[in-house]
Image (cartoon, rainbow, N blue to C red):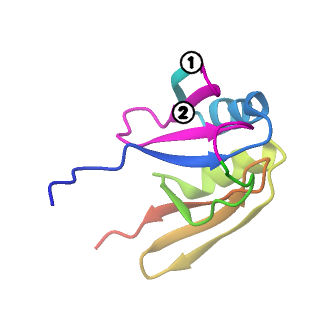
Amino acid sequence: MNITHASFVTLPVTDQDRALRFYRDVLGFEVTADLRMPPGRWLQVAPKGAQTAFTLAGPGMGAFEPGSARGIMLVTTDVDADCARLAEAGTEVQGPDEHPWGRMASFRDPDGNGLMLLTEAHQ
């Protein structure tokens, strides 16, 4: 096997513009692709410098169920500050809590997709 990285993760959403506002304006992701093509809009966002993008798949872009993505871990340098920013933006956050592997919190995007934030413990 010669796999080097994941290209993208699909996040099923009901409204791509609403999802874009959340991922760009709240999480600070950059738009890496925004193309009109059959069968719909190909919209991708990613943290600055990340190898893996997130495809915000709206209606017509596959048999995806909005809100069905779970367990997506986002690594951050300051989980507490990011949780405060999410709360200020009206997003409900669980945590952060201490774990042997680091300090972690969870939240959902506007469609209910489950994401987590992790500040890794220093070994």
Q: Is residue 74 left or right of residue 69?
A: left
Q: Quadrant of residue 40?
A: top right
Q: Position of residue 12 (x, y in %)?
A: 68, 48
Q: Where is 37 relative to 72, above or below?
A: above
Q: Residues within 10 Å of mark 1 (few under 14, many from 20)?
A: few
Give the residue displayed 80% in from the left and 44% down from the top: 88
Q: Position of residue 123 (x, y in %)?
A: 28, 74
Q: Where is 7 relative to 20, above or below?
A: below
Q: Is residue 103 left or right of residue 21?
A: left
Q: Position of residue 47 (x, y in %)?
A: 48, 37
Q: Which residues are magenta?
A: 35-62
Residue furthest to the top in view is 36
User: Observer-nearest residue: 110 or 69?
Assistant: 69
Q: Earlier in the sequence, mark 1 or mark 2?
A: 1
**Separation of marks 1 and 2 at Cα, in angstroms:** 12 Å
Q: Where is 7 relative to 42, above or below?
A: below
Residue furthest to the front in view is 38
Q: Residues within 10 Å of mark 2 (few under 14, many from 20)?
A: many
Residue furthest to the left in view is 2
Q: Position of residue 26 (x, y in %)?
A: 69, 37
Q: Helix, strand, or loop for circle 1?
A: strand
Three-letter amino acid code at the position of disc 1: Leu
Q: Quadrant of residue 19?
A: top right
Residue 35 circle label: 1
User: Observer-nearest residue: 109 or 40?
Assistant: 40
Three-letter amino acid code at the position of disc 2: Val
For label 2, the residue is 45
Give the residue displayed 64% in from the left and 59% down from the top: 69
